[in-house]
Image (spheres, helix red, strand yellow):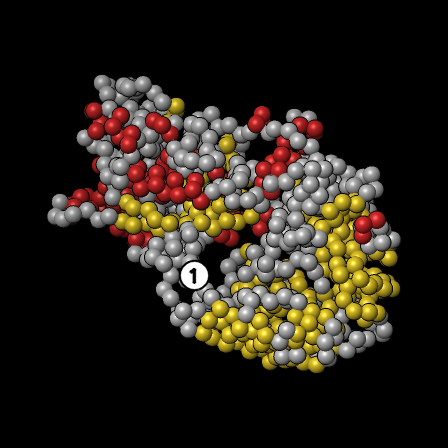
Amino acid sequence: MNKAIKLMGCLILLALQIQAQSRVTTSRNHLEKKITHRTCGSGVMDIEYEKWLQPLIKLQEQNRNKGAAVVYNIPVVFHVIHGGSAVGVGLNISDAQINSQIAVLNEDFKKLNADTSTIPGVFTGVAANCEINFCLAQTNPQGGATNGINRVHYNTFGGTTPPFQKSYIDATIKPNTIWNTNNYLNIWVVPDYKDGVNDILGHATFPAGSGLSGLTAPFGTTTTDGVVVWYRSCGRIGNVQIPYHKGRTATHEIGHWLGLRHIWGDNTCGNDFCGDTPTQQSANFGCPSFPHVTCSNGPNGDMFMNFMDYGDDLCLKMFTTDQKSRIQTVMSNSPMRVALSQSTVCNPPTAAAPVADFSANTTTIAAGGSINFTDLSTNIPTGWAWTFTGGNPSISSSQNPTNIVYATPGTYDVSLVATNGTGSDTETKLGYITVNPTGTLACDTITNFDLLLHTPSILGSLGWGYVTGHNDYLDIAKADKYTIIGTNQTIDGAYFAFGIGSSSGTGQTATVTVWDNDGAAGVPNTVLGTATVTYDSIAAGAAAGSLTWVDFVPNIAVNGDVYVGIQFIYNPGDTLAIVHCDDGEIVSGTGWEKWANNTWHPYSEPNTGWDIEVAQLILPVICPFVGVQENSPSFKMNLFPNPANTNLNVVIPKQMSNGNIHVRVLTTLGANVLSDKLNFVQNGIYKIDISSLSSGFYFIEVLTDYGRQVEKFQVSK
C-alpha cells in the first residue's frame, strides 16, 4: 500500500473516532478489515485438567438427580477500548449494542434463542438450557453506581495504536482496566487485533481447578481473567459485521471461560470430553449442510450448529446436556467462578453518606489570581457547600467551582460539606491556599490540561504521523494558548509531556518557543523567547513516561495572552508528539498548530483542520519578574526508583519544601488514588508508600508553598 493510501485510511479512521473533519475526505470501506472465517485465540487445556474435572462432573450429575439445578447469576462489566470517538461511533460502540449482547447471552445459555427451532431433529433431544443468567453490573468496585460499561481510551496505556496483539491486550490492557474477578465477568470489547499474524474475533481464559498447579493451559488470573471480543462481533445491532453479527462470538468465548473445549477437541477427530457431541474431524466454517459426515460419524455427522464450533453466527444454535454439566460443575467448583456466583454487584449500590475530599489546580498564587477546585468526594454526593476563606466568591454550591479569586496576600482555609440522601461529611484543609504579594519570589505552574478531569491521549500512528507532532502534512509547530494573570510576570521554563519521542542520535534539537498573540485575530506572531531541547531528551522522557523540562535563560517577560509550544523540522529518525486530552474535554480547545505554509490554525478549525477541541499537556512555570531564581533542572523534583514497587522516594530541594507539602497520586485517567500531607525532612527525601497500588503508570503531584510539580512514574510488581 503506498503512502497516500495509508495516509487517507488513517485520517478517515481518525475522523470516525473523533468525529472530526480531516484535511482530506474519502471512504475507508475499501480498507476495512474483513475476517473471512471464525477465529478464536483461546488456548488448549492440558489433559491433566480432566483428571480434576471429570470426577466432579459425575458427582454433579448425581446431585442433580436429587434436586433442582442451580441457576447461576453472572455479573458482567464491558470494558470498551476506543480511540476517542463519541459513544456509538466507531470503536466506542453504543450502550444498545452492548445490551443486545447481554440479551444474546441470556437467550443462548438458557436455550431461549429462536433459532433452536431449526436444530436438526436428531440433536434436539440433547439441546440444553445451561441455566446461566447474565446481568450488567449496577455497582462499581468503588461502591458507586455503574451501567456495567467502562469506556477507556486506548492511549491511556501509552500510545500504542491498533491493530493490537493478543499478548498486548493480556499483558497491558487487561491489568490496567480489570475489575475484581471475584465480583465481575470482565469482557473487553477491542479494536482490530491479532494473534501473531492472524486476525482473531475473540479469546477467553479458562477456569482454573482448585489445587491444580504446573499446567500449561491458559487459566485466568486476577489480572487476566475474562473474555475479549472484537468490537464488530459484539452484539447483534449497531457496528457489527456479517457473518459475525448475532453476538455468537461472546457466546463461544464465554463457553471457554466456563470450561468448554472446542467441539472437535482441538485435534483431528479429537475429544471434547462431552459424550453427546459427535466426534468430528476439525472445525467447521461458514454454514455446512446437514448432515455433514466426518470421522465416520454418520449418518448424522457433525454437530456443526454447536456454539463451540467455528460456524457463522447464523449457524450456531445450541449447547448440549453434557456441556451444561461441565458448565455447572465449573460454576460450583472452580474458585473464581464460585466466588463470582456469590457476587451482589448486579444490585444497585448500598446508600452511604459521602466522604468529603477535594483538590485545587494550584495552592500557591499571586494576589489577584484565581483557583479552580475539584470535588473528590466518594459515595455519590448530590450537594456541595464550599467555603473559601479569603476568596471571592467566598461560598459556592457547585460541584467543581472555578475562578475563585484571591485578592489579598495571606494563607487561607478551604472547607467542603458533601451531602447526599443518607448524610453529610465535612473536609477542611487548614492553610491550604497561599496568596503571595505581587513581586514576591513564588513561582507557579499553569496548564490547560487538568490531570483530574482530562484523559491523556495521542491521535495518530506510525503510518502517517501524529496530530500534535510530526506528520505527513509537515506541520512545523504546536502550541497552547495561556492567559497570564497579573503584571510583571515571566515564564521561567516549561514542562512538556511527550507521549511519542524518538531520536536519530545525531544531536538534533527542537525549539521551545513563547509567542505573543499580536498576529491578526490574536494568533501567535512575535517570538518573545526560545530555548532548545534535544531529541535525545525528548525520547528519554517519552520512554520513561516523565515530563521534559526546558529552561528559559533569561526568563521571558509576559503579560496577557501568550502561546507556549515547540517548533521542529523533519530529520530522519527524530519524531515527537505532545500528549493531549480527549476531544471535547476542554471547550473551547486551547491547542494550535502551524502548517507547512507558515499559517497558524487552531485544532478546532472545521473542514480544513482537525475539528477537535483539545489542550496539550504543556506546563509553563510562571514567576514574578524581580529576583527570581532560575528553575533549573537541579531545582525540579526527582523520583527514584522509577519503576517502583512498594516505596517511591520523592526528592524535593529544601528551597521548595519549607512546610505545607501536599502529595497526591493520580491514575492516568485522573482518579485520585492516594493523598498525604508530608512533614518537612532535612535531607529533602520523602518516602511515599505505594504498596497498595497495582502495576501501571501514575502521576504524582507535589504542592508546596513554591508551586506545583507533576511527574509520571511506573509501579511494577
* Secondary structure at numbered mark 1: loop
Against 642, residue 470 (above or below) is: above
Q: Give the quadrant of the N terminus.
A: top right
Q: Is residue 119 left or right of residue 605?
A: left
Could you tell me if residue 133 is visible in this image?
yes
Amino acid type, mark 1: Gly
Position above or below: 587 against 98: below
Q: Where is residue 602 in the image (x, y as percent from the top left)?
A: 73, 47
- Residue under circle 1? 144
Location of residue 481 in the rendering, given as x and y in whole percent from the top left corner? 75, 55
Is residue 698 visible to us here? no
**Number of callouts:** 1
Give the image location of residue 252, x and y in percent: 36, 36
- Give whichever of 529, 335 is nearer the camera: 529
**126 left or right, relative to 396:** left
Residue 478 in the image, given as x and y percentages of width and height: 76, 48
Q: What residue sits 18% from the left and 30% below the top? A: 125
Of 373 and 4, nearer the camera is 373
Up-down relation of residue 13 to residue 219 (above or below): above
For mark 1, does the 10 Å Cα neighbourhood hold few (<14), some (14 to 19), or many (20 or more) residues? some
> Left or right: 468 with respect to 149?
right
Residue occupying image coordinates x 44% and y 44%: 95
- Tell me the residue at 38%/53% (across/down): 137
Q: Residue at x 13, y 45 (%)?
A: 65
